[in-house]
Image (cartoon, rainbow, N blue to C red):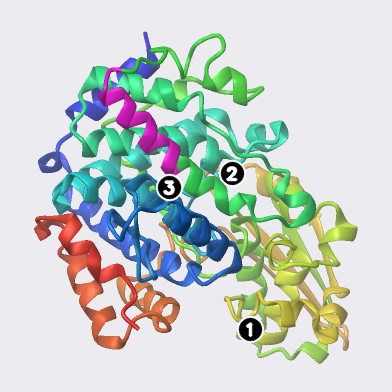
Amino acid sequence: MSITIDLARYCGELKFNQLPDEVIDRVKYFFLDFIGVACRGSREDSSRSIYRFIHEMRCGNRGGVLIGTKERAPFIYSALGNGVFGHAIEMDDVNNESSLHPGVVVFPSALATGEMVKANGKKLIEAVVLGYEIMVRLGKALGPKNSYDRGFHPTGTCGTFASSVTASKMIGLKEEGITNAMGIAGSQAAGSMEYLAQGAWTKRFHAGWAAHSGMVAALIAKRGFRGPISIIEGRDGFLHAYSNGADATKVLEGIGSGFEILRTSVKPYACCRYMQPPIDALLKIIKENDLKPNQVEKVTLGLLSAGASLIAEPAEMKYRPQSIVDAQFSMPFGAAVALLYRKAGLGEFQLSRIRSEEVNRVMKKVEYRVDPDLDRTFPRQWCATAEVLLTDGKHYFTKVEYCKGDPENPLSWEELIEKFHDLSNRIWEKERRAKIVDQIKNLEEIRDLKKWSSILLRNR
């Protein structure tokens, strides 16, 4: 059995008319979410650095859109830019079982390649479903904790394969071409977790680089360049090189009987996915009991062991975040702003909050521990607990099994559209935003992505 070839065969054979209505709906749902986060993310300092680089590389205002800007760029660079934009504010979608972010890799690749070949909306839907499928399956096979222990960010590593398949499907490659594209992608899979050490921007780069390099892999495969056909399962292949405990059976397990895009979550809070269940639990206690910050003596949070190294260690750094990236991966900070402001959105993950004496004082009330009981259902469930002790001795406890945004506790279309408007209202006027929503809901009717994509440019 060749896992790589079998995957390529499945990808080459899947067609739009085989997709259930609920899968098509989820592509639209996640595409709108991606556009919103990329639009808002285009304003971040890290995105402006990438934008300046791309601006210097471009030749005329042709190519793919850079979402939320006034410009287009060479297609492979638009994929790079939009991936970085989309991952900048930590509000992009997540697949829990694989602990990675598929949308910020797959959609930049699908959109840029679709613009390049003037594909239609049906082809984009087809390719996106496969991108999610490949990325999540590889992430589950690696095992999230195995990736982190080896120092790899699975969004960057698994994402490169996903982008190569997405782009291959968009340009019409069949089994052999897709196999070669994945083989080439395997030599580009990258993403170091060292960004955590200094609160650097490279995590954001991982998504854009995966989208970009996967496109490159597909485009040179189309021109006859060959890659190893055992890149996933081989002795020196992806699973062996990037994990000490990979389970190769998970790559093909149940393929064709369901779709991973249906098991993907949306983020309501602007921080690491591992922080979201504890924040959800804390907010549940605060809101249900109408607690004020000055009533709280101590907050104790129960965390998953897989995420502890991201959001809880080293403790001295997590209690003293210095940058927005630090704050996005600081459980004490996330809990403190949730307690103070009853929310944890973009407005809370700002330098003014990081420097706030009040926030720093409340962070000292936050304790956390790794809870082995929570690990029993991970990664199928990302559970968390919160206990709040009041100054008068009263205490409250709750456990969250599925936080807001999980497939089992999803944002409705109406809530997702509200999130989209909140993120994009500084870039597009109300009429433009409403038009984007309407056209995404009818994505299969778009005939030419290159013509359509102009709607994603800034007009003011």
Q: Looking at the picture, which amino acid does disc 3 mark?
A: Val
Residue at the spot of label 1: 342
260 shown above or below 288: above
Which sits earlier in the primary sequence, circle 1 or circle 2? Answer: 1
Q: Which residue is mark 3?
A: 105
Tell me if mark 3 has few (under 14), some (14-19) or many (20+) residues whose alpha carbon lies within 10 angstroms of its own: many
Tell me the CA gap for discs 2 and 3.
Answer: 27 Å
The numbered mark at residue 410 is none
Q: Residues within 10 Å of mark 2 (few under 14, many from 20)?
A: few
How far apart are the alpha carbons under marks 1 and 2? Answer: 28 Å
For the N terminus, the image quarter is top left
Give how far across and how far down residue 19 sits, in percent. 17, 43
Q: Residue 426: where, in percent of width, then height?
A: 43, 83
Secondary element under disc 3, as helix, strand or loop, is helix
Q: Main secondary structure of the magenta part?
A: helix
Crowdedness near tag 1: few (<14), some (14–19) or many (≥20) residues, C-alpha within 10 Å: many
- Residue 17 is covered by the magenta coloring: no
Q: Earlier in the sequence, mark 3 or mark 1?
A: 3
- Report helix, strand or loop for mark 2: loop
Q: Quadrant of residue 297?
A: bottom right
